[in-house]
Image: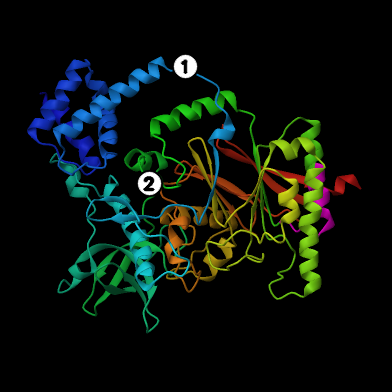
Amino acid sequence: MPVSRQQIIIRVFRKYSHSLGPEELEYLDQILKEHDISDEDVEMSIELIAKEYNKQDDATMKVSVDILNRVYQTLQTSADQRTQKGDGYLDPEDHLHFVDAFEMPLWHWSPERGSFEKARHQSSVLGTAESRILAIRDRLNIIKQTILRNEHFAPSTIPGRDREHLLTLKSTKQLLGRAGERFLLFGMLIHSKEGKLCLEDLDGTVELDFSQLDQPSEGLFTEGSFALVEGDYTENATFSVIAVGHPPCESRETARSIFGHVDFLGKGASTPLEDTQYAVRIQRDFSEMNFFFFSDVWLDQADTLRGLQKIFDNCIENNFIPKVIVFCGNFSSSGIAQGNSRDIQSYQEGFDSLADLIASYALITRRTHFVFVPGPLDLTVNSVLPRKPLLSSFTARLQSKIPKIHLASNPCRLKFFGQEIVIFRDDVMSRMLRNLVGVKPDARNEDLKRYLVQSILDQSHLTPSTTHIQPVLPEYDHAMRLYPLPTCVVLADKYDSYRMTYEGCHVFNPGRFLGRSLGFSTYTPASRESEACVVDLEAEN
């Protein structure tokens, strides 16, 4: 076998943490020869086999010829079926799913297998001391396995100059007795009992000294965030930091190519190839389809219903009926958790008025899915994230008049073909800024928006902080994860509206549906982009 082909095959399988013996190399080379694969197409072909091999439940780090043969036969069969299968009509209703945070299956990271394992027990809202620890360990291990797969950290199987520039992670236990040496550490930012900022990993803790740090990397660092920290271990048993940054973000395509067989949402797993085929069909058959997103829909304000009426009128006039409309709280201008009976009655009347308004548009009522996501001040069973849906006692008329209504948790997810949209209503920006640790960035407004998006996606979590900053039900912490990276994240926040795409994930804040110019956003699955919209009530006057 040509040496260059051997290197390519080894490199591709090494990327997925698998090693090959002489017999397996010979088998793969034989496949390439049978199909007359050119040198230019070797890497793409082996990549396809390696991805499929990694999905097998019995796949081991040492590659087996028997499993390789099974993978090869499966790929052959799938190719034949795709050739015979025509392009039939796809009903979007069959591929539209609304995922409640409390219905998502719990997957733990297994360091022994180097993969995800489904929890065998039923999740509980009470949680245990063990589940609290396990939730944090899962966060650390999931991020760490993406770091070690990153090209700057993963060693090549072929000796070369790249090894000289390889970054090697060390543990806090490896610092002992090595004062004056430089290290790269990965762990969680925490405060000690004495109030000192420290870095904690699975092996221990070390106090951080930021006095020598000139400029941190972009992003927001809070207690509970995971960080890569480079610096020198000192005689005083402190770590003098010279550089700090968020872990590198792994694209959805890369994560799905490795863990595409894992059904994270509980709605059936699709292969990356099927996702690609669906994307083509969406662009072709559903190019005009749109989802609407609203936040802070204060139903006790007359302008809110007037604005919605104007939007619905425009939809009917232009025959532009959205497939999904998502309403995020708060649904009242003031919290009613401590309110009197008059406040509660007003809250109830707001939902009833909205139900009557929607029902008056028969076409929209019949075709559109309506999703209601509670805000921080809305009445739900619990106040800890993830939050249960709105109480059914307030939404009885909505449920009776709207056939396609979904009372969702916060956060919740929307699965449309191969796309995953995460919807989260919380004042994330203000909480992150209040709890910055270490170096506080001197950033402008636009920079802060970018820093927020980068931090949340790099951390693979909607609330990258400790539980005393933002309590989270430990056995449902997986509902807050952003791994694999979603297609889109809706951060409904009282902060200014924004939209940006980071590592292929589109993130936007629809803005608040308040005032005389009411803002909201539309999302187009075909383009995977959002657009800001404004309803100007001043123009009517």
Q: Amino acid at mark 1?
A: Gly
Q: Is residue 293 found left or right of 517 in the rendered image? A: left
Q: Residue at x 14, y 32 (%)?
A: 65
Q: Position of residue 96 (x, y in %)?
A: 56, 38
Describe the element under mark 2 as helix, strand or loop: loop
- Of the residues under marks 1 and 2, which one precedes in the sequence? 1
Q: Nearer the viewer, residue 533 or 59?
A: 59
498 in magenta: no
Q: Residue at x 29, y 34 (%)?
A: 52
Helix, strand, or loop for circle 1? loop
Most foreground residue, 419 or 359:
359
Marks 1 and 2, how far apart in space? 34 Å
Of the 4 image quadrants, the one containing the N terminus is top left
- Residue at 36% across, 66% down: 188
Residue 179 in the image: x percent, y percent? 18, 73
Q: Foreground: 350 or 221? A: 350
Tag of residue 250: 2
Within 10 Å of disc 1 (Cα), the crowding (few <14, some 14-19, many 20+) is few
Task: Tell me if residue 177 comes above or below residue 370 in the rendering.
Answer: below
Q: Amino acid at mark 2?
A: Glu
In the depicted view, which residue is nearer to us: 524 or 123?
123
Residue 100, placed above or below residue 30: below
Highlighted range, magenta: 297-310
Horizontally, residue 527 falls left or right of residue 63, namely right
The image shows residue 247 at horizontal and vertical percentages of: 36, 55
